[in-house]
Image: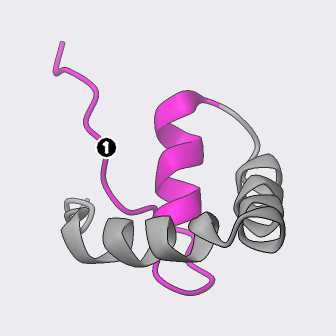
Amino acid sequence: MEPKRLTKGHTKMICGVCSGLAEYLNVDVTLVRLGVVVLTAVWGSGLLAYIVAAIIMPEPPLE
């Protein structure tokens, strides 16, 4: 069995960061997207974290 790997998701809205994180954690992508919105609205750190993740997360493998 291949180990789980964090990559950008296949169901992209902007860059696929939230969907990739949701696939990795086995949670609904809507919850992850809401979390990013809350972090951005409350502390402003969600936007920075999203941009950094969009840059460093690898693309998903072609299937």
Nearer to me, 27 or 34: 34
Quadrant of res 5 = top left
Farthest front residue in view: 43
Farthest top residue in view: 1
Can residue 16 be seen here? no
Residue at position x 47%, y 54% in the image = 20
Quadrant of res 47 = bottom right
Q: Where is residue 16 in the image (x, y as percent from the top left)?
A: 48, 72
Farthest bottom residue in view: 14
Query: Callout 1: helix, strand or loop?
Result: loop
| Left or right side of 14 for 36 | right
Nearer to me, 36 or 42: 42
| Left or right side of 5 for 11 | right
Residue 9 in the magenta stretch? The answer is: yes
Residue 49 in the magenta stretch? The answer is: no
Q: Tell me which segment is drawn in magenta.
A: 1-26
Residue at position x 25%, y 62% in the image = 57
Residue position marked by numbered label 1 in the rendering: 6
Up/down of 52 relative to 2, above or below? below
| Left or right side of 2 for 28 | right
Q: Where is residue 10 in the image (x, y as percent from the top left)?
A: 47, 66
Up/down of 4 relative to 62, above or below? above
Give amino acid for label 1.
Answer: Leu
Nearer to me, 4 or 21: 21
Quadrant for the C terminus, please: bottom left
Q: Which colour scheme is used?
A: one colour
Can residue 52 be seen here? yes
- Label 1 crowd bin: few (<14), some (14–19), many (20+), radius 10 Å: some
Up/down of 35 relative to 11, above or below? above
Quadrant of res 12 = bottom right
